[in-house]
């Protein structure tokens, strides 16, 4: 792969000379671009190895804020064999051009593009520049001829610039880390609040469950009340029936006693008639003399029996009358009691009916309350369920956000890649003092960067840049990326 | 409740993964390097599953897994690599070292939860 980049870098050197500064400035604005280390590597390589006079003047003057021709001459005299025609040929004073560095670079870039349009132009120009560089005295080596080194801004300013860029990259990395961590902590805070809300809603749901139990108990009470109401009504009905039965029994006893009294009178009348018959039989027996003596005895016995019967009926009569009287009295009392009883019973029954009505109304109220409770509980349950569902959706979103927070780590690693690239160029600019040595090391930078890549996205970006520069055959990123999840 | 050890040099990943795994219902232990992970697994609690980054200062995730596999206590412990690394050869290295699976950051939470349920059926 390394060899693959060598011709590319060599050819790209003049084309990217002016782009370097533009890219460096752009990096300060957008440190996360993965394209930048590549562009920096190529651009900085051009700075370090190709010292074209007019560009150096423009950059040096702009940087120093002293765009005078004296600097132009000083620098050009330090590299007398490098062409210095562009600025002057534009017809404008060097100071005016130097004031607009980016315009000068853009003009140079256009010129480079025009030059690159010729197939032989690039290698020819590169070879010419390298030859010029080789002809230059070995000045600017570490510890040697510091005069020239100090007089060429590419060797004096570039390391400073790159060092600043590395520091900016580090700062961007640290800020990314801090922002990502802060983001995760905020998510944690949000999540805790969501969990608390969900917990409260769950508690409310549990409370609703208890209310459900209470409503069920309430309904059971209502049912029991209904049963009690039925009992009360049955008791009232039974009391009415018993009162009626008592009256009928007393009347029946009275009737029986009255019937017995009548029968007893009949027996008494019969006994009286038998006695009269016995008297008559005795008279007739006396007339018959001795012949009637036996009959006289019988008549006497019949009279005795009649008298005994009369005696019994006489004794039973008062008893029956007493009974009749008692029954009558009881009947009368019962009649009176009945009136009173009827009043009392009616009162009791009325109270029972009132209680029953009251119980009925209470039952109806309870039934209505149960229905309203059930409706309220159901409504609250629906609301809470909706809230809990919303909470679950928030929870799901937070989970996705937590996973997305890993993107911060991905960006951090991309920035690290940029920092590595700039650091490598910085080391070259600082340590290598000859253009060929710098060019050699620069050639290694891209290979090293590519080998350090961990993400397909880094390889894809690099590949895209290289393809734009004509290396269509370079394959860094896989056409079919590996799956994001794989169980072995 | 199963315990998962998450190993990563990025505090952001450690914290976000910890929160994510706790929401999945797991206990979480953390280590910011392979060396730190070895200390953690020798503590009082033994992890039921390990999720490690691949590229870390010091030993990488594959080397960590290889080291843990040499310990009889972790011979059958599921070990996943969660990384931005996308090279096939790195996957193969992890697999050869005894990794159970490979996940690319950022891990999809639904996918991750499903994988964990599969590897830790006890929950």
Image: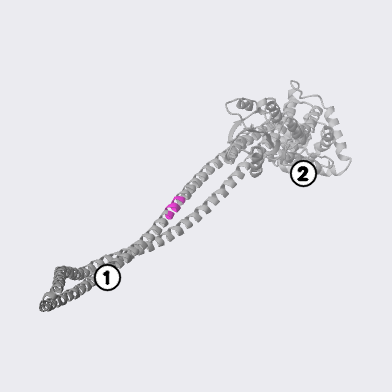
Work out how far the residue at label 2 is from the one at label 1, CA to CA, in angstroms.
136 Å
Q: Check if mark 2 and mark 1 are on a common chain.
A: yes
Depth check: A464 or A329 in front?
A: A329
Q: Where is residue A212 in the image (x, y as percent from the top left)?
A: 45, 53
Comparing A86 with A396, the one in front is: A396
Query: In the rendered image, is residue A376 in sight?
Result: yes
Residue at the far front: name it.
A290
Q: Quickly name the residue at label 2.
A: A107
**Closer to the eye: label 2 or 1:** 1
- Where disc 1 sits, the SS reads helix
Foreground residue among A267 and A260: A267
Ranked by sequence position, the earlier of labels 2 and 1 is 2
Please report, as a chain letter, where disc 1 is located. A
Query: For the residue labelled by badge 2, is the local secondary structure a helix, a strand or a loop?
Result: helix
Give the residue number, with chain letter if any, for mark 1: A248
Badge 2: how crowded within 10 Å, few (<14), some, or many (20+)?
Answer: some
Quadrant of the rendered image containing residue A55:
top right
Instruction: Tell which residue pokes out farthest to the right in this image.
Output: A120
Which secondary structure class fits the magenta region best? Answer: helix
For the magenta stretch, what is the residue range?
Answer: A209-216
């Amino acid at each position: 792969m390394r060899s693959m980049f060598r011709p590319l870098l060599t050819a790209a050197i003049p084309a990217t000379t002016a782009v370097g500064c533009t890219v460096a400035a752009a990096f300060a604005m957008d440190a996360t671009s993965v394209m930048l280390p590549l562009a920096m590597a190529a651009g900085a390589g051009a700075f370090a190895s190709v010292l074209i006079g007019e560009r150096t003047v423009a950059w040096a003057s702009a940087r120093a804020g002293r765009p005078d021709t004296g600097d132009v001459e000083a620098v050009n005299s330090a590299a007398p064999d490098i062409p210095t025609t562009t600025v002057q040929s534009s017809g404008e004073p060097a100071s005016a051009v130097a004031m607009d560095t980016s315009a000068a670079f853009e003009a140079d870039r256009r010129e480079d593009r025009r030059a690159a349009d010729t197939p032989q132009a690039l290698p020819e120009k590169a070879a010419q520049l390298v030859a010029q560089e080789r002809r230059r005295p070995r000045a600017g080596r570490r510890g040697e001829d510091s005069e020239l080194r100090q007089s060429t801004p590419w060797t004096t300013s570039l390391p400073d610039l790159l060092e600043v860029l590395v520091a900016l990259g580090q700062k961007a990395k640290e800020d990314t880390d801090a922002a990502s961590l802060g983001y995760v902590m905020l998510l944690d805070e949000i999540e805790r609040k969501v969990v608390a809300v969900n917990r409260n809603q769950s508690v409310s749901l549990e409370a609703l469950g208890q209310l459900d139990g209470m409503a069920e108990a309430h309904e059971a009470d209502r049912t029991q009340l209904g049963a009690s109401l039925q009992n009360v009504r049955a008791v009232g009905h039974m009391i009415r029936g018993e009162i009626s039965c008592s009256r009928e029994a007393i009347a029946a006893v009275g009737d029986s006693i009255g019937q017995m009294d009548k029968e007893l009178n009949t027996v008494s009348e019969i006994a009286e008639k038998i006695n009269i018959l016995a008297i008559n039989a005795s008279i007739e027996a006396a007339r018959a003399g001795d012949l009637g003596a036996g009959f006289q005895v019988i008549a006497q016995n019949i009279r005795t029996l009649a008298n005994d019967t009369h005696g019994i009926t006489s004794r039973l009569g008062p008893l029956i009358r007493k009974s009749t009287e008692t029954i009558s009295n009881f009947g009368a009392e019962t009649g009176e009691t009945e009136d009173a009883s009827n009043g009392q019973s009616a009162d009791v029954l009325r109270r029972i009916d009132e209680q029953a009505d009251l119980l009925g109304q209470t039952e109806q109220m309870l039934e209505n309350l149960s229905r309203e409770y059930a409706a309220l509980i159901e409504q609250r349950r629906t609301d809470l369920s909706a809230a809990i569902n919303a909470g679950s959706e928030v929870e799901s979103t937070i989970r996705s956000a937590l996973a997305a927070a890993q993107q911060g780590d991905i960006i951090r690693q991309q920035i690290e890649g940029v920092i590595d690239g700039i650091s490598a160029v910085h080391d070259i600019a600082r340590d290598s003092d000859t253009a060929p040595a710098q060019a050699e090391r620069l050639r290694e930078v891209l290979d090293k960067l590519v080998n350090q890549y961990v993400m397909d996205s880094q390889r894809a970006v690099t590949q895209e840049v290289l393809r734009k520069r004509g290396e269509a055959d370079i394959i860094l990123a896989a056409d079919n990326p590996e799956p994001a999840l794989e169980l072995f | 409740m199963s315990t998962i050890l998450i190993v990563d040099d990025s505090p952001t990943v450690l914290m976000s993964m910890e929160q994510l795994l706790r929401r999945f219902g797991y206990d979480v232990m953390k280590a910011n390097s392979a060396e730190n992970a070895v200390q953690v697994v020798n503590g009082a609690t033994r992890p039921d599953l390990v999720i490690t980054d691949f590229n870390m200062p010091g030993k990488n995730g594959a080397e960590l897994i290889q080291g843990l596999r040499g310990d009889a206590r972790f011979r059958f412990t599921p070990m996943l690599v969660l990384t931005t690394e996308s090279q096939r050869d790195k996957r193969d290295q992890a697999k050869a070292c005894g990794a159970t699976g490979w996940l690319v950051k950022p891990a999809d939470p639904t996918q991750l939860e499903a994988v964990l349920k599969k590897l830790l059926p006890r929950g």
